Amino acid sequence: MLVLWNGQLLPRTEVQVDLEDRAYQFGDGVYEVIRVYGGQLFLLNPHLDRLVRSARAIRLDLPWSPSQLANQLRELVAANRLVDGAVYLQVSRGVAPRAHAFPRASQPVLVAYPLPASRPTEAQERGVRATFVEDIRWLRCDIKSLNLLANVLAKETAVERGAQEAILHRGETVTEGSASNVFIVQGRVLRTHPANHLILDGITRRFVLDLAAREGISTVEAPFTREDLLNADEAFFTSTTQEIVPIVEVDGHSIGVGVPGPITRKLLRAFHAAVQATIQQEV
Amino acid sequence: MLVLWNGQLLPRTEVQVDLEDRAYQFGDGVYEVIRVYGGQLFLLNPHLDRLVRSARAIRLDLPWSPSQLANQLRELVAANRLVDGAVYLQVSRGVAPRAHAFPRASQPVLVAYPLPASRPTEAQERGVRATFVEDIRWLRCDIKSLNLLANVLAKETAVERGAQEAILHRGETVTEGSASNVFIVQGRVLRTHPANHLILDGITRRFVLDLAAREGISTVEAPFTREDLLNADEAFFTSTTQEIVPIVEVDGHSIGVGVPGPITRKLLRAFHAAVQATIQQEV
C-alpha cells in the first residue's frame, strides 16, 4: 500500500509518525473519509470544502488548496489501483515540543491512505438494530476533529449490545449516530437534526437531503426526541461508508413495521443510481 | 534523549509511531505528566493511580501494574540523568485498522519521555493574568484523555489575550483552567470546584487541599461563579508543572488587592517545603 505523506507517495512501512505530532498527544487535527466508487472519489469537493472549514474552525492553516489536495488524492487512488473502497485523510497541526498552545513554527502533517469499504448490501436490504447512548461530546461536534473518544466509546457500547450503531441523544433530543447522521420519516416528511454545533453535517446527510428534494419528498431540519424516533414510520442513518442504512429496531422497539420503509427504499434507489452514474463517468 | 517505548529504552530517533495507532486517529488513550525534583518522581503513586482510573474509564486494559510502571519510569529518569523536569507518559489503545469500535486484538502502546520543566518563580512571586473562556468540553473531564483539542483552543485564546491561563466556565460556573485547577480564597476559606465529571481531579489540586488542611486553612469543594472569582480575596491555579500560581488579574479586573495574598503565599511556602523534602529524600 502507498500512503500520501506530506505530498509524497510512500510505502506504508516507510511512514513514521513522530511521537510529538500534535495529533498523537492532543488529537489536534482534522480528517475526512471519502468513498471511492469505480476508482472515482465520490463527492470529493464537498469533503474537501468541509476539511477546509474544520481546519479553519481549529485555526489550522492548510498549506494546500482544495485543488492541490484533490490532485494528490487522485494520484493516491491511482497509485493504489483503488476501485472500490475509501480514502482516509487527516491533517494535524504538526510536530512540536509538547505544550497546549499552538506552536509558533510547525508544519501541518498530512497523511492519506486507502481504507477497505464495501456496500453494506445486506444491512441496506434488511435494516439494522441501533441503541440509544447519551451524547456526552463537546459542543463543537460540527468540527470533524480527531477528538473521537466519545464516539469510540458510544460505538463500542453499540457493538456490545448487538447493535450496528449508537444513536446519540442529548437529554431527550436525538443528535446523530456515533459515526453517522440519523433521519426519521414522519408521515411523508423526512426529518433530521439541524446542522448546528451539536452534530457533524455529514456529506451523505446533505446529499440525501438533496436527493429527497429531487424525489419530491418534503424535508425538515429540526430536532426530534427519542420518542419521536421510536414512533416514526421509518428511520435510517447515513454515512460516507454506509451510505443509507435502514434502522428497524432500537433497543428492542420496532421502528414502523420493523422492515425498511418505502421512503427509505426510494432514497436508497436514488443513492445507488447516483453511485452508478459516478462509476460510469469518464475519468 | 532516551524514550520509554513499550518497556524498552530507545533513542528518541528510533521511536516510530504507527499511523494507525489509535491515539493518532481517535485520541484513544490516556496520559499523565509527573514532575521530577532532584531526580525524584514527585507524587508518583497518585499519578499512577489516576492513570489506572483513566484507563479503566475508557475501558483500556493496562498490561502493566502501577509498580511495574513506577520501576520503568525510575529507569527512564535515571537513564536520562533527569534532575529537574517532568516525565510525560501516554498509553494508547494500540495499533489496528481504523474503525471506531475497540479492536479485538491490539496491544496498548506506552510512550514516556522527559519534558523540560522549571519552577515558575517569577509567576509565583508576582502572580499572573488569566482570562475567562467558555468551557465546551465533553462531560467526562475527569478522564485524563488525549482528547485535548478544547483545552488547546482555550489555552491559545489565553496566550493571544496576553494571559497565562484560561479559566473555563460552564454557564456562570467556573470549572477549572485549560491545564490546571482553579482555587479562590473567600475570607479564610479556600474553595475549588468539586471533583466530579466536569473537572480533572488534579494531583496538585488534591495535594494543595491536603496542605491547606495541615496548615489549618478551611477548605470547601463547591462550585463557584465567575463573579465569586472576581470578588474573591485571592485566587490561584494549580498544576503539576506550575505548582501554585497566584492569579492577580482576570480580564482586566484585579483579584483582591492585585498581588498574591497571604493564604496563597502560605500554601506556596508549604508546597516548596514539601518539594525540598522530596529533593533531600534518599534514593
Image: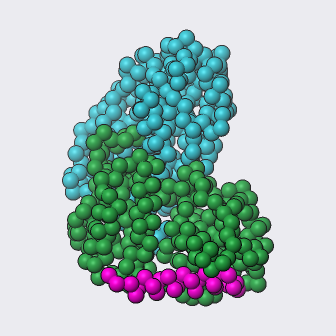
Chain colours: A green, B cyan
Camera-side residue of A276 and A200: A276
Q: Is residue A266 magenta?
A: yes
Provide the major secondary structure of the magenta segment: helix
**A127 left or right of A143 in image:** right
Q: Position of residue B19 (x, y in %)?
A: 33, 64
Residue at 50%, 45% (x, y): give it: B150
- Residue depicted at x 57% and y 45%: B136
The answer to which of A12 and A102 lies nearer the viewer is A102
Rendered position, B201 above or below A161: above
Residue A71 painted magenta: no
Q: Is residue B3 visible?
A: yes
- The magenta segment is A259-283
The reply, left or right, for residue A46 in relation to residue B119 is: right
Q: x, y percentage for residue A52?
A: 41, 56
Residue A196, position as x, y percentages in the image: 60, 55
Residue A142 is left or right of residue A39, and the answer is: right
Residue at the top extreme, as displayed: B257
Quarter of the picture holding the C terminus of chain B = top left
Position of A108 relative to B178 (above/below): below
| Image coords of residue B86 (percent x, y) | 35, 38
